[in-house]
Image (spheres, helix red, strand yellow):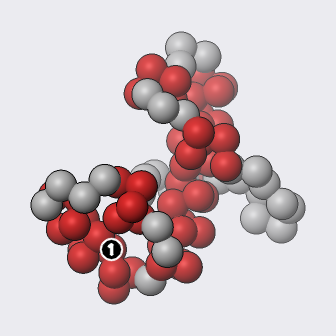
Amino acid sequence: MQVDYRSRYELPKNEPVDTAYVRRLESARQFFVPNDQQLTQNYAAAKLDVSRWLSEAGAQSLYQRLDRIRAGEPFAEAIAP
């Protein structure tokens, strides 16, 4: 999770924001684009998406899930609810 709390990485909290597009990115090249505004948007969307996921999955399960990934379980399966 990104720990940069500058406002440029914050999305509106009181409005519905679609962050699902960051989950559809399949490569680092798709995330790390040369357009600074889009790159900032990607970071902000990912930050919010991970925050939402963690609040649903529970912080206690984070390290267990990381251990499963280290053991070879596919990422998508390890993060599934």
Which residue does the image show at 46% across and 67% down from the upper left?
Answer: 80
Q: Position of residue 34 (x, y in %)?
A: 53, 14
Which residue does the image show at 52% across and 24% down from the upper left?
Answer: 30
**Above or below: residue 74 compared with residue 66:** above
Residue 67 falls in image quadrant? bottom left
Which residue does the image show at 68% across and 50% down from the upper left?
Answer: 19
Q: Nearer the viewer, residue 20 or 51?
A: 20
Q: Position of residue 8 (x, y in %)?
A: 63, 43
Q: Is residue 8 visible?
A: no
Q: Position of residue 46 (x, y in %)?
A: 55, 49
Quarter placement of the N terminus: bottom left
Name the residue carrying label 1.
62
**Above or below: residue 26 compared with residue 65:** above
| For residue 18, side relative to residue 34 (left or right) | right
**Residue type at tag 1:** Leu
- As drawn, the residue found furthest toward the right would be 15
Residue 56 falls in image quadrant? bottom right
Q: How many marks?
A: 1
Q: Is residue 77 visible?
A: yes
